[in-house]
């Protein structure tokens, strides 16, 4: 009698394991799609004191999911952890103002582009800096592993002593405000947002003609065609039905 009990119990266990196993593999194909972000990049993504994620990317991702017919769970992971987790499949997707680059395309599949961006330099208002080259010999803050870091390295070399890398962009901006770096290079949308938040008249933006246009895309694990299709479908739908425009204009004003 006891033997039967053990057998039945093992069968029940095996069965439930199989079911949860399936559910896990099903993410992006009916299950909840786990999306990571680095919620320290306003106005694209930020985390409130209550832990709630807000921002353009967050609203966009939710709208894409709704239109694309899938459910999302968006979580703050941090920049590098998010990139790693999508690479190894712990997260299904990442939305985080991620610029589409050839190097990243080798590791991830990108959705259709959803936003145009470029780099900007943020300096104190009294700075004489007029271009990236003028920052030679100065301390430049960047978020490690971002295109901001890449443009600085391209101009001054990978071993340039003046580059200070930060885990997140707000930490770089803090150091600029405290005078520990002379400039920060980051995406235009974010620099413009911080210009509104920093003490009025104390900082300014500098453009550099060498900065190339960038476009943001949503990343999925390389080869996850099914999820990519759903995301692109949703994105297409919300562009067509005006939802994209509504979200865009909430954050950035009239869309041309
Ligand atoms: N667009 C830049 C890049 O792809 C910076 C993105 C940083 N995003 C963030 N949420 N911290 O490298």
Image (cartoon, helix red, strand yellow):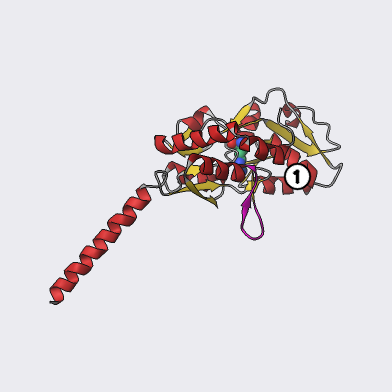
Within 10 angstroms of label 1, few (less than 14), some, or many (20 or more) residues? many
Report the magenta residues as a range.
Answer: 47-56
Query: What is the quadrant of residue 106 in the picture?
Result: top left
Q: Is residue 158 visible?
A: no
Residue 223 position, x and y percent, is 39, 35
Query: What is the quadrant of residue 157 in the picture?
Result: top right
Question: Which residue: 58% across, 31% down?
Answer: 240
- The answer to whether residue 53 is magenta is yes
Q: Residue furthest bottom?
A: 1
Left or right: 2 with respect to 196? left
Question: Which residue: 54% across, 29% down?
Answer: 101
Q: Quadrant of the C terminus?
A: top right
- The answer to whether residue 52 is magenta is yes
Left or right: 31 with respect to 190? left
Residue under label 1, please give it. 176
Residue 118 position, x and y percent, is 67, 30
Residue 65 position, x and y percent, is 51, 43
Compare residues 23 and 211 and report the one nearer the observer: 23
Query: What is the quadrant of residue 254 in the picture?
Result: top right
Question: Which residue: 68% across, 23% down?
Answer: 210
Most frequent secondary structure within the magenta stretch: loop
How many dots with numbers?
1
Residue 77 position, x and y percent, is 54, 51
Q: Is residue 231 visible?
A: yes
Compare residues 205 and 193 and report the one nearer the observer: 193
Q: Residue furthest top?
A: 209
Left or right: 119 with respect to 200? left
Q: Quadrant of the N terminus?
A: bottom left
Element assignment for label 1:
helix
Q: Is residue 20 above or below residue 195?
A: below
Compare residues 161 and 199 and report the one nearer the observer: 199
- Quadrant position of ligand 1: top right
């Amino acid at each position: 009698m006891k033997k039967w009990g053990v057998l039945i119990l093992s069968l029940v266990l095996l069965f439930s394991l199989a079911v949860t196993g399936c559910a896990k593999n099903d993410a992006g194909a009916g299950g909840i799609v786990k999306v990571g972000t680095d919620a320290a990049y306003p106005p694209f993504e930020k985390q409130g004191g209550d832990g709630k994620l807000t921002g353009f990317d967050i609203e966009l991702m939710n709208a894409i999911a709704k239109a694309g017919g899938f459910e999302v769970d968006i979580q703050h992971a941090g920049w590098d952890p998010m990139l790693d987790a999508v690479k190894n499949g712990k997260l299904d997707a990442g939305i985080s103002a991620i610029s589409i680059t050839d190097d990243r395309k080798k590791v991830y599949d990108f959705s259709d582009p959803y936003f145009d961006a470029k780099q900007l330099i943020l300096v104190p208002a009294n700075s004489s800096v007029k271009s990236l080259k003028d920052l030679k010999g100065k301390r430049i803050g960047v978020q490690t592993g971002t295109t901001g870091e890449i443009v600085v390295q391209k101009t001054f070399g990978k071993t340039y002593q003046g580059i200070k890398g930060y885990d997140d962009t707000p930490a770089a901006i803090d150091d600029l405000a405290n005078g520990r770096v002379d400039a920060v290079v980051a995406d235009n949308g974010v620099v413009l947002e911080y210009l509104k938040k920093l003490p009025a008249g104390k900082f300014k933006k500098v453009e550099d003609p060498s900065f190339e246009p960038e476009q943001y895309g949503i990343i999925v694990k390389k080869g996850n065609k099914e999820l990519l299709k759903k995301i692109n479908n949703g994105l297409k739908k919300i562009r067509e039905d005006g939802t994209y425009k509504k979200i865009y204009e909430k954050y950035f004003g009239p869309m041309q």
